[in-house]
Image (cartoon, grey):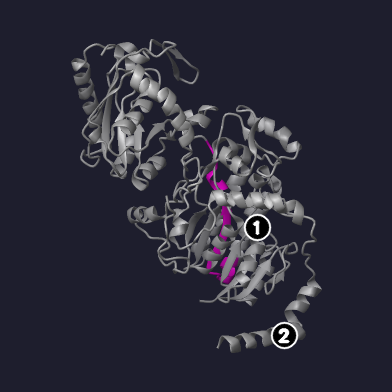
Amino acid sequence: MEQPTDPGGPSRPATDVVPSRPAARRADLREHLPGLEPERRVTDWGRSERIEGLVDRTLGDALYHLWLRVAVEGVEHVPADGGALLVCHRAGATPLEALLVAKAVAQEHPRPRPVVPLVAPGALAQPGLAMVLPKLGAVADHPANLRRLLGDEGQLALAFPEEGGPRLLRDRYRVRRLRDHVLAAARVSRAPVVPVAVIGTEEVTPTLGRIPLPGGRRLPVSLPALLPARVTVRFLTPIDPGGPASVRELADETGAVLQRALVDLVADRGSVWLG
Amino acid sequence: MSARVLIAGLSRPLGARLAQALEADPAVDALVGIDERDPPLALERTEFVRIGTDPAALRRVLAAARIDTVVDARLLTDPAEADARTRRTVNEGDTDALVAALAATGVRALVLASSAHVYGCGAGDPAYFEEGMALPSGGTELERGLRRAEEVAGELRHRVPGARVAVLRLAELADPGGPGAPGPALARLLSVPQVVPAVAGFDPRLQLLHPDDAVAALEHAALEPLDGTFNVAGDGVLPLSELAALLDRRPVPVLPPWGAGIAAVGLRRAGLPLAPELVALLRHGRAVDNRRVKATGLRLRFTTREAALDLRRAQRVAPLVGGEPGYRYDEGLEAFLRRSPAVLGRRRAESVQDDLSGG
């Protein structure tokens, strides 16, 4: 990538110092985004191609092709460029969907591009996770981060905005209410919202119970292995974030679309394990 | 456009280098520097006045030299630089006095060299701080003091109608320091031999600012009509591990993930500049969005990576050039160089020659 060039150069008189309208200002500032120097091994967000590639070639390939035999539908719904927000439901005890959805875009899309998984800021404050998650591309779902990712840099972000933690196996594929702060950012940045329905992952790592932890959080209990269920990833028709009257309605509509797709997928699925 | 500039904090590293940069600019008609200590660099035409922020003396200097622009490079922004009490006196008390003197003499432009430390450093931070974001109210004594200094500086807009105040929030300087000036805390930490102290389990995203760019930003803010708050940092954000690799060092987790603050107390005794702000930085990292200042026409010459490489160069040549005798300010000598008819006559002759050869 090349460095963005400033058309005026250093001698340009700085008369446009404090433009007043914030909307116009953000657009003007976009041309001043720094480029990535070719010698760099890690992006400005902390993503390391080396480490991500390593995980992808080993764990990613094995799970995607051999163990979970992922089938992908509707990948053309993912925009080829510009910011877009993929919204997926949480399923199972591990963040397996993030890996599988990112790999689905990388493998099946005619113009593959990196997917930025959004994680809770709390996860990035944990020692160890704080070191590893950014290397794999994860970014905290802070509104300012989303505005930069979706609005300024035109990246593809993947959010899991469902309320609550991992659900129990008996509640599988029931979409809970979506928290709206991520969708609010998509609306501000005018980034299309692409719901992504994933089935199979609830059976891969079923949540059998939850242990209450101090501080109100609960630790999911799962099997010590990934079960070989078949996984289907279906990208749904993008939703215009400006369409619904409010952010709440946008969140509810996204949740409803996801739920309908999940019902269809579960109804049409043959064997959970074979095929 | 001509300017009559006063630099408060002339003897601070940034203030002295800014004076050198402004001396070369013919648009600067008058250049006055104030500080309580001697300037650390040889200056050509800057007039040094040994006053602190004594309001009466400052008012007289401002009025007599008809100063229109004041650059305040005086704030103690480095976490490992001074004790809390000195910092409070300088950052809060002296800023009050300075702004009062400016208001009394009607100076209409103030540039304040602040620091990205005003944003604090914590777990829920955005990946890039923007100037418009609400600042946290808590934080360490350094962070609160800097916020207060920025607020006081901003009040000049109300106290002098039409005044402009440019607050520059500078990122961590990649300044190797020199004899007598140890350099900023993060640069010192990156200059520990062979290793870079880290917090176990964390690889923070960090940004550096090359000292040349910091000086260029201050000069730009002094001479162009900048008004408002601007982040100044090199392009690009690097994790500590990559910074360490650029400096041929290895990150070594000397601080435990829990109780790092307590462990840092012991390491401070051993000479590491591990102030609380720096420990937080080693854990959570910090980056600022520098697009706004770039949009005003400032060209930053060094990215974070290039600033780190330049720091490495300085680290390598330090043993070769370190022992040289530095500059020492001598009042009589400076007075001779500035006012002696012999020197002035030669300078006049040179400028005439320049005019002849140029025309």
Please count the marks in the image: 2
| Residue at 47%, 45% in the rendered image | B128
Dot 1 or dot 2, earlier in sequence: 1
Q: A59 or A79, which lies in front? A: A59
Q: As shown in the figure, which amino acid type bears the numbered disc 1?
A: Asp
Q: Circle 2 is placed at which residue position?
A: B346
Quarter of the image holding residue B346?
Answer: bottom right
| Tag of residue A87 | none
Query: Residue B93 at what x, y percent from top left?
Result: 65, 55
Q: CA distance from mark 1 to mark 2?
A: 41 Å
Picture layout, residue A34 above or below residue A230: below
Q: Residues within 10 Å of mark 2 (few under 14, many from 20)?
A: few
Picture layout, residue A24 above or below residue A265: below
Q: Provide the residue span drawn in magenta.
A: B102-122
Query: Residue A192 at what x, y percent from top left?
Result: 26, 40
Q: Residues within 10 Å of mark 1 (few under 14, many from 20)?
A: many
| Residue at 67%, 53% in the rendered image | B314
* Label 1 secondary element: helix
Left of A234 or right of it: where is A205?
Answer: right
Q: Circle 1 is placed at which residue position?
A: B94
| Residue at 63%, 53% in the rendered image | B91
Picture layout, residue A226 above or below residue B123: above
